[in-house]
Structures are given as structure tokens and as C-alpha cells.
Image (cartoon, rainbow, N blue to C red):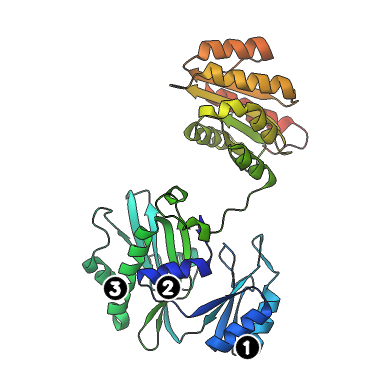
Amino acid sequence: MNFEEHAAKPLLAAAGVAVPAARLAATAEEAAAAAREIGPCVVKAQVPTGKRGKAGGIKLAADAGEARAHAAAILGMEIAGHPVEKVLVEAQVPIARELYAAIVNDPASKGPLLLFSTLGGMEVEEAAARDPQAMRRHPIAIAEGLQRNDATRVAQAVPEAAEALTETLLALYRAYRELDAELLEINPLVVTRDGRVIALDCKLTVDDAAAPRRPGLLEKGTPDRLTELEARAQAAGLKYIELGGAVGILANGAGLTMTTMDAVAHLGGEPANFLEIGGEAYTKAQTALEILLANPNVRSLVVNFCGAFARTDVMADGVVKAWKALDPQIPVFFTIHGTGENEAVALVRRELGFEPYDVMDDAVAAAVAAARTTPGARA
């Protein structure tokens, strides 16, 4: 779950990270009223995406009149597909230096990773290109957490505010842990002319699985925008993600589905979707197939089942019945292995007249080729 800036910053403040005074506004008049209370301010579009400034979604205002005018221009904009429905009116601060700080989940170290750079205010990629050594990476032992001496060592890169920066980094890690965050990024983290360290922006992503541990937290976040087909799948209790390719994928289990997607890409194609039908989802095979086929980009289909505890013949039975009911006119390629595979293969052969492939890559390669040769297809 992503959190817009106005929702993320109070969570930072509660952990001890300093943030500017701010008010949320849904109209230009509300923005003007907030500016009269705050003084010189920044009017910032609130959408769950970055690069708002480049899109014209962040403007400085000296007074209430300018804040009203900026809010009127920003509200109703669309930034990266997100309509702007509210703005954050935030106090200006006297900036002496811009920094970058983040804590992320790091697959390499299998734990949290502190990222820090003195090149704040820039895109991370731009900063790395400008100076590859500028981004400091500090793996954190999850059982111990970020230690003060480690935070102090990082903060020595900013000697004029080392003590305040040390406390901010410790508070940032505290917020990361308390919120079950996957990503907590501040860019820019600024040093003010009077030596304070303040977060001027915040990107926060929280693990959806943390909902039972953090009652009410995810209600403050911004749900991912779903396509029409994704919304239909969610309502039906199916895990479906719409992608841009032409090779449809139906598999059991998230891991096998992702493996199949990787195989499609490896063999020169592009997957049209993620759709897993494991567990009890086989009872929803017709709904799943309807949703998958409703994507007009789909030109071929891979059905990949691999069962251990789940029986592949039971899963195949659901798909066979759905296929016969819907009678789709696209090429389909089955590959089936595991518990019940002999019965499943025989069922597909007898009821649909298709011969399942012994090797997954062969089924995927055939699907990629079929998608390419179908008129209007994009494999």
C-alpha cells in the first residue's frame, strides 16, 4: 500500500522525524485559508507517484493569493494517470543543504538497507550517474536494528548537522519498523540554515500483509488503481494483474505463474497477465477464463499446472469445463505435471482434443509463436 505525502508525514512525525507545518486542502479557498495560517508556503499535488515537480504539481507561494492561484491550477491536473483531488499546503523552510535518505527491503542482504546521499533533491538514478560513490549503502541486521554508532558514522558526512541527522536516521528506522514498511524514502531531507534536519517529502510503502498488526493504518493509504478487469478479478477473489503483452497465462500458485511469465519473456514474448488459480480458485475457472479472455490483447494462452498436494486433474477439470462453456477461439497450450497428471492429461486430450506438452518451455515457445502469427497480435 502506498501512502501519499499528507498521510505519510504525520506517521514520520510520530516516530520523531521533523516535518514542516502543513494543511490539506481540497479547494483553492481551503488552500488560501491554510496559507493565511502558515505564511509563505509550498502548494503540492497529492498523488501516489513521484516527479510531481516536473509535472508542475509543486509551486511556491508567498501569500494566500498565490496559494489560491496555484491550488486552482494544480487541482484537476493529471499526473502519471492520477487525477489531483487535493493539495498539501506546507510551510517553506530555509534550506541550506539537501540530502537523501531511505530505508528499503534489500533482497541481497535479506534485511533492511539504509541508503544515504548528500545529493538530495535529485532523482536517485541521476545522483548515481553524477557520482556513483555518493550513495552510501548500510545493511542493517534486523535482529539488532540501526545502531546509534552506525547512524552517527553515516551522519559524519554532514558535519554541520551530524547530531540532528543521527537522531533523524534513528527515527527513520524506527518508523520503518513500527509501520512494517517496505520502502521509506525522504528526498529531499534538508538541513536548514539554523541547523535543523527536516523531511520535505516522503515516499512510504507498507506491506499489505501488515494489516492485522496495524489496525487502521492501511485505511490511510492509497489503494493501487485497478483496471476494470483487475477490479472484476478482485471482486471474484482472484489474483489477476493486467500486463501489456499478448500471451495469456493461467497457472496454479504465484511462484509457478511468475515462472511462466519469466519463460514467456525469456523466449521472446511478453505476458498479457498474471493470473493464478491455485487452491480453491479452480472452482472459479470459468470466471478466471472470462476475465483473461476479455483482454483484447490476448492472442494465445498457456495453461501451466504443477501439483503436489493439489491435484492437477481437479484443476484441469475446472478449466476444461470452462473452456467448453466459453468456446474461445484462440490457441491454447497446456503443460501439466505432478499429482494426478496422467488423469489430467487424459482429460484434456479426451474432452478438448489438445495434446499437453511434456516440457513447459515447449508449451511457452508455442504460445509465443502463436501470438506472433495471429493478426494484430503483439507477443
- Quadrant of res 361: top right
Q: Mark 3 or 1, which is nearer the eye?
A: 1
| Residue 180 point in image, percent of width and height | 39, 55
What residue did someone put label 2 on? Answer: 119
Instruction: Please give the name of the residue rendered at 65% of the width and 19% of the height, measured from the top-left corner.
Output: 320
- Residue 295: x %, y % from top left: 71, 38
Q: Which dot marks residue 10? A: none
Secondary element under disc 3, as helix, strand or loop, is: helix
Dot placed on the residue nearer the N-terminal end, 3 or 1: 1
Q: Quadrant location of residue 103?
A: bottom left
- Residue behind mark 3: 166
Task: Find out whether the residues at labels 2 and 1 contact each other: C-beta distance under 8 Å.
Answer: no
Spot occupied by residue 101 in the image (x, y as percentages of width and height):
39, 68
Distance of label 2 from label 1 (alpha carbons): 32 Å
Residue at the spot x=33%, y=52% of the render? 111
Q: 261 above or below 317?
A: below
Seen from the viewer's position, the closer of residues 158 and 232 is: 232
* Residue 90 seen anywhere in this rendered image of the structure: yes
Asked if labels 2 and 3 touch by Cβ distance under 8 angstroms, the answer is: no
- Against 19, residue 192 (above or below) is below
Which residue is the site of mark 1? 64
How many numbered marks appear? 3
In three-dimensional space, the C-alpha distance between marks 3 and 2, rounded to whole angstroms, equals 17 Å
